[in-house]
Image: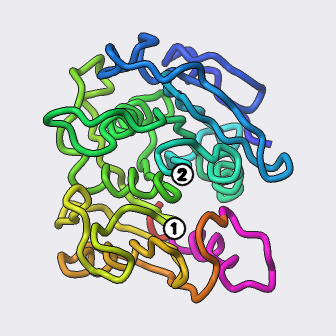
Amino acid sequence: MPHIVLLLASALGLSAAQPDAVIQNIYPTTIAPGDEDFSCGPETNTTTDGGTDVHITNVSVPTLTLQQAGDSPSSTAVIVMPGGGYEILSYIKEGEAICEYLNELEIDCFLLKYRVPARPDEEGMPWSWAPLMDIQRSMGLARSNANNYKKVGAMGFSAGGHLTTHVSTTGWQERLYAPIDGSDKESARPDFSVLIYPAYLTPDGPTTTNVAEEVVPDKDTPPTFSVQTQDDGFLSALGFYVNCTSVGVPAEMHLFAEGGHGYGMCDDDSNALCEWPERLASWLQTQI
């Protein structure tokens, strides 16, 4: 089982919620930046899929949970962002289960519970601005903690894949909130990005190679690994992959014939799609 270094909790003012996890509110106040005039009701957790997943919604206090791979911190950490259409978070299937797998690879994992549902559009703010603030802040917190990671990557599923892509392209250059402390001086750009059945990357449907304006890659976009299936109604990783290669961003994509959307880690040994975690493990070895 993974363990947590108590020094990290002390350094960042964290509180241990269970023996193998440390949870931190990413903002020092209970009202997150931009939410001063917004209320989404009490946070709710709903058990789904026969008890194998939990859907969380009405998140107004975003948190970052560290699951450390061993007694000593790894040299690499990944911030994981579950999906759910920016309405809910598939917190176990696309969150805790992913952290467990990363820990098996001896990679520390930060699980981000970002704000959902999506806030109303704000003038001058990009789409999904509240979650983008949350990942910007989280990248700085992960980089400034006592573990001194050499690399911090980002990984997202579905809407979380869009959020990962956003912060890896146009969303890392400038914080959307006023600086809070020294962690906001750290770069919000991930060192590498992992996109698993990402959504919303293409504005004109799944067959286009155009990408949405907030996720246009450039030469500063980090190396990217992506997984999607041909029968996924979004199929937006393909367009992003094409755009990455056109600007020289190292990109690896695995496109499978069948599997749809929302399969998480995938546990059918007879399905080639379920090889994606092993392929990710091999790719990660080239990044850490």
Along the horizontal axis of the image, is 59 left or right of 33?
right
Rendering coords of residue 3 (x, y %): 73, 35
Q: Residue at x 48, y 35 (%)?
A: 116
Q: Is residue 185 above or below residue 221?
A: above
Q: Disc 2 to disc 1, how far (Cα)?
A: 9 Å
**Magenta stretch contains residue 195:** no
The type of colouring in the image is: rainbow
Q: Is mark 2 in CB contact (under 8 Å) with mark 1?
A: yes
Q: In the orientation shown, which residue stands out farthest toward the bottom?
A: 257
Q: Residue at x 54, y 29 (%)?
A: 58
Residue under numbered circle 1:
197
Looking at the rendered structure, the secondary structure element under dot 1 is loop
Q: Is residue 226 above or below residue 191?
A: below
CA neighbours of label 1 inside 10 A, class few (<14), some (14 to 19), many (20+):
many
Q: Residue at x 68, y 20 (%)?
A: 16
What span is colored magenta in the figure?
Answer: 264-283
**Magenta stretch contains residue 265:** yes
- Point out the image quarter for the N terminus: top right
Foreground of the two, 34 or 223: 34
Rendering coords of residue 253 (x, y %): 44, 79
Residue under numbered circle 2:
83
Any part of residue 70 in sight: yes
Q: Main secondary structure of the magenta part?
A: helix
Q: In the orientation shown, which residue stands out farthest toward the top?
A: 29
Rendering coords of residue 201 (x, y %): 34, 64
Q: Residue at x 49, y 45 (%)?
A: 79
Q: Quadrant of residue 128?
A: top left
